[in-house]
Image (spheres, rainbow, N blue to C red):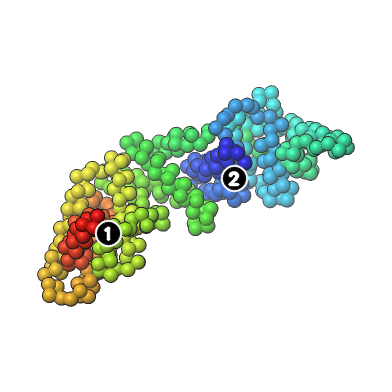
Amino acid sequence: MSQHSADASLLGYYFQGMYALVKLLDANDYDRISIETFDDVYLDGDVKTLYQLKHSLNSGGNLNEKNDGLWKTIRIWAKMVEKEEVDEATFFIFVTPLLIDENCSLTELSKNDSNRSRVVDDLLMEAKRVAGKRKIAKSKQEALPYKTRWPGCEAYLSLCPEQRVDLVNKITIHPNNFNIKDIHNEVTLKIKNTVPLGIRPKLVERLIEWWDRRVVLGLLNEASRDISKHELIQYIVTLVNELSEENLTDDYGDRNEEADILGELGGNMEAQIDLVNGGKSRKKRAAVARWQARNQRERWLDDDLINGIELKKLDKRLINVWDDYFQTMKYDLEDEDENVLAENGRSLLDWSHRKAFQEVIPVREGWRQPYLVQGSYQQLAEDLVVGWHPEFDEILKKNSSNQEGEK
């Protein structure tokens, strides 16, 4: 497979998920949608709709009865009709960036309440033509033509006349369809009447990111493959609330599995945990929280949802609350041995992760995710602004001086 065809396939798979988002935004309240189940996209509700998608960044050319992509799709749908796997409430949608040839009977499949008898006959004529050409080639012991088109033609020919009529009556063609480049605009159009203009661009961006992850989780069977309209609307409502002036978005709360743990370790943050014999589990949770908090803070700043002054005020509050615990601990343990110092330092470290977020005034009134406080404390520990061991400052600065001297 060439690099070009590989890229096209990847874009095609990605388009399936994004197309499903657009369709679900248009769907009824109790509908559900899935990707790569009964078809490329399957919308399940009072009406069951199977979408077969043909994606392309190049919309040149026209669609007619000789289109290989159409026949590949007919093969799939004809088998379902032949095996009686569909009922009266099931419909097939062929989605393509191509325009339909105006002289072609397929134009009837893009209309409502059209006469489709000509389509049934024209498809049958093309299927018989392909079968005849292959028969002639076989008799001459030549290479058989129409390898891509033939399986669809064969499936269509295997249907009885009534089944062919039933199949064609279930098909609708959506020509001149949008492609992956247009997804942002398509989603924006679908939510423009329900989402305030000021937050619309940021909401659409986050909605697409969330949907992309949600589809992947479904494909990995880590979540239901079916995504309900209720789940989608619920997330949009959450985003509207988070993007209001009184609140902030939570972009990293459910992305802890993506954290680059090794990339977070190796500096003062890890050294501070080692000083109190914190072990691997405390290092891992510290690395994850720091990754989440740093990325979240940067995302807010990039999107102008918060300013640097607010974050500096939060850090100041973190330092003040920590300092109250730290100075008291340091005074009480002045004459204790190293084991006692490390044990109490671990307790302070655990406090920063388990309880501090409940004691520190949040960055915004509506913000309640623990990882911002947890991870910000770890960043402050990396910068040696806070620490856990009563003598962290002296020990780490001494180690730093010794390393500089060795150089």
Q: Which quadrant holds residue 406?
A: bottom left
| Amino acid at pointer 2 | Asp
Instruction: Count residues near mark 2 (Cα–Cα under 10 Å), then give few for <14, some for 14-19, many for 20+.
Output: some
**Residue for point 53% across, 33% down:** 178
Quarter of the rendering occupied by the C terminus: bottom left
| Mark 2 → mark 1, Cα distance in angstroms | 47 Å
Q: Secondary structure at mark 2?
A: loop
Label drawn at residue 40: 2
Query: Residue 229, position in %: x, y?
Result: 48, 48
Query: Residue 356, position in %: x, y?
Result: 23, 62
**Residue for point 72% across, 47% down:** 79
Given residues 17 and 2, the one toward you in this image is: 2
Q: Is residue 362 above or below residue 305?
A: below
| Amino acid at pointer 1 | Met
Q: Secondary structure at mark 1?
A: helix
Given residues 246 and 67, the one toward you in this image is: 67
Q: Is residue 167 above or below residue 290?
A: above
Judged from this view, the residue extending furthest toward the right is: 139
Query: Where does label 1 land, which residue?
Result: 269
Residue 124 can be seen, yes or no: no
Q: Which quadrant holds residue 396?
A: bottom left
Q: Which quadrant holds residue 136?
A: top right
Residue 60 can be seen, yes or no: yes
Q: Is residue 373 above or below residue 53?
A: below
Query: Residue 75, position in %: x, y?
Result: 71, 43
